[in-house]
Image: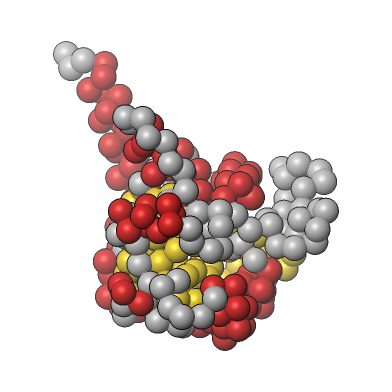
Amino acid sequence: MAPLGDKSDSAEDAAVSQVENSSISNILIVIAMQTEALPVVNKFQLTEHPHQAFPPGVPWVRYHGTYKDLQINVVWPGKDLSLGVDSVGTISASLVTYASVQALKPDLIINAGTAGGFKAKGAGIGDVFLASDVAFHDRRIPIPVFDLYGVGLRQACSTPNLLKELNLKIGKLSTGDSLDMCPHDEASITANDATIKDMEGAAVAYVADIFKVPTIFVKAVTDIVDGEKPTAEEFLQNLAAVTAALDQSVTRVIDFINGKSLCEL
């Protein structure tokens, strides 16, 4: 008789295989800013539909609809209740991802948004990347093992066919809660070998990993972090145009996913 542990492992492997070979039908798109979210919402003709599982009083916004064979939910954290600005950053991203995974039970998460890029790694304004893996660059804990926890390196869902078909760039994504880059962050980003930098990706990945929901990251470059222009100025200057490029890429990603299983991505 096989040990109980072997039976459990076999059952788990079978469940994973079944999920990987089943057609994707329910997609959660997590986006940080209203400006980034609305073009996607309009493209797929989604309607605002608060979910009863979200706690009362939270600013989170959910849009829902059907596109081809897919149920699509776009969720963004909404506006800060005190200041009225987009609730960007890792805390809001973690909370809204957790609540959405619990309420909506997605087969796949897409974290879509804008990002800074590094020209030294081949990034340019308007480039759209799929992230191969994600990590934090501002959680510095110089104690053995805790240092690895702080970095929080996680791999994105493998999508070789999607990457080939859409001809997108691929690179590593580094996440932190500041738009600018201090010397300590720069050292960590270099250690992460990152090509792109955002404020949400690794937080979404952390929650997705807890619940074993496969996740892909689609990031469009608004500013060159190692360029000559101030980051905030370049970000605002390019946001509208780059968001349009992001919308086009997300649409192509959704069209590719439709009718496919995880193992076909």
Q: Is residue 147 visible?
A: yes
Q: Position of residue 167 (x, y in %)?
A: 31, 80
Residue beneath the point at 53% across and 68% down: 113
Q: The N terminus appears in which quarter of the rendering?
A: top left
User: Where's residue 188, x and y in %?
Assistant: 37, 52
Image position, residue 111 (x, y; %): 50, 60
Residue occupying the far bottom of the picture: 241
- Of 213 and 236, nearer the camera is 236
On screen, residue 44 versus residue 221, left or right, reads: right
Give how far across and how far down residue 42 sits, in percent.
66, 78
> What is the basis of the colouring in this image?
secondary structure
Of 29 and 189, the residue lying toward us: 189
Q: Quadrant of residue 264?
A: bottom left
Whether residue 251 can be seen here: no
Res. 87 image quadrant: bottom right
Relative to 144, residue 216 above or below: below
Left of 56 or right of it: where is 9? Answer: left
Taking the image as shown, residue 31 lies to the left or right of residue 87, namely left
Going 40% across and 58% down the picture, which residue do you hit? 186
| Vertical order, 111 against 221 (above or below) | above
Quadrant of image for the C terminus: bottom left
Tally the marks. 0
Q: Is residue 245 above or below residue 146?
A: below
User: At x 53% / y 63%, what residue is drawn?
Assistant: 180
Give the residue at the far front of this rendering. 183
